[in-house]
Image: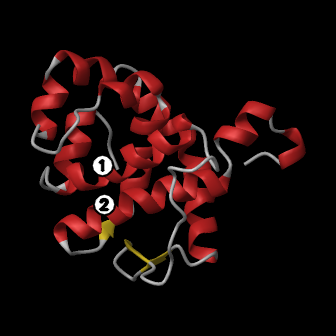
């Protein structure tokens, strides 16, 4: 990662560790609440690319009843796959920094099997007040949704294959 003073304003605002760690927290929370198991380490990397890209975020289904595989093969999902691997690869350092930030601030824990769990003690303030913009709140909500949705999609390797990425 580049030093903060060498990052552009847009990069510093959009890809800062605090913001991305909350996106990571939300997707891990959604995943763990859905399957009552720890989340794979790769989950924040997959979800961050889905929710930060506005067109992809807006194309996500409204509910978890639409299966992941169905969405990926429909027009909305197939459009989302365009350049997905490239976007994901480009933000890996930022997401690593965010996960490290989240671990350091005890948002979640990493076990010996490279699985993430959330802190049960932590409570976030509501995103419904004026503390965040609608777009930021939507990113957090969609990250939680994606965590739940991917948890229901089956093996994480299958999700990755459907998105065209490799571990």
The earlier-in-sequence mark between 1 and 2 is 2
Residue 67 occupies quadrant: top left
Q: Nearer the viewer, residue 119 or 91?
A: 119
Label 2: how many residues lie within 10 Å, few (<14), some (14-19) or many (20+)?
Answer: many
Residue 40 versus residue 134 in the image, above or below? below
Residue 105 picture location, percent across and down? 63, 75
Quarter of the image for residue 51 reads top left
Q: Residue at x 84, y 48 (%)?
A: 4
Asked whether the residues under the numbered discs 1 and 2 touch, taking CB atoms below 8 Å apart as contact, a structural biologist would say yes
Residue 43: image location, x then y, percent: 36, 55
Whether residue 88 sits left or right of residue 59 in the image: it is right
Disc 2: which residue:
30
> What whole-number distance in Å separates the C-alpha atoms at marks 1 and 2?
6 Å
Which of the labelled discs sits on residue 100, or is there none? Answer: none
Q: Determine which quarter of the picture holds residue 120.
A: bottom left
Is residue 157 positioned above or below 63 on the image? Answer: below
Residue beneath label 1, please? 145
Q: Is residue 76 above or below residue 40?
A: above
Give the SS element for disc 1: helix
Label 2 sits on a secondary structure element that is helix
User: Is residue 90 left or right of 115 when viewed as pictured?
Assistant: right
Question: Pointer 1: residues within 10 angstroms few (<14), some, or many (20+)?
Answer: many
Q: Pick whichever, 125 or 13, lies toward us.
A: 125
Give the residue displayed 23% in from the left and 75% down from the top: 37
The location of residue 123, given as percent across then percent down, is: 50, 73
Give the percent coordinates (x, y) of residue 158: 16, 46
In percent of the image, x 36 and y 26: which residue is there?
Answer: 58
Tell which of 70 and 6 is nearer to you: 70
- Left or right: where does residue 159 sit relative to residue 22? left
């Amino acid at each position: 990662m580049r030093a903060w003073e060498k990052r552009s304003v847009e990069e510093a605002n959009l890809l800062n560790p605090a913001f991305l760690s909350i996106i990571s927290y939300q997707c891990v929370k959604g995943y763990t609440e859905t399957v009552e198991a720890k989340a794979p380490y790769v989950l924040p990397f997959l979800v961050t690319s889905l929710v930060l890209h506005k067109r992809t975020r807006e194309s996500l289904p409204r509910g978890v009843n639409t299966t992941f595989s169905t969405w990926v093969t429909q027009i909305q999902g197939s459009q989302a796959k365009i350049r997905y691997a490239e976007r994901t690869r480009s933000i890996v350092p930022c997401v690593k920094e965010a996960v490290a930030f989240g671990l350091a601030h005890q948002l979640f824990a990493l076990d010996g099997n490279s699985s993430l769990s959330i802190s049960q003690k932590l409570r976030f303030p509501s995103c419904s007040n004026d503390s965040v913009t609608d777009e930021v709140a939507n990113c957090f909500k969609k990250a939680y949704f994606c965590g739940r949705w991917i948890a229901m999609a089956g093996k994480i390797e299958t999700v990755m294959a459907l998105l065209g990425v490799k571990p």
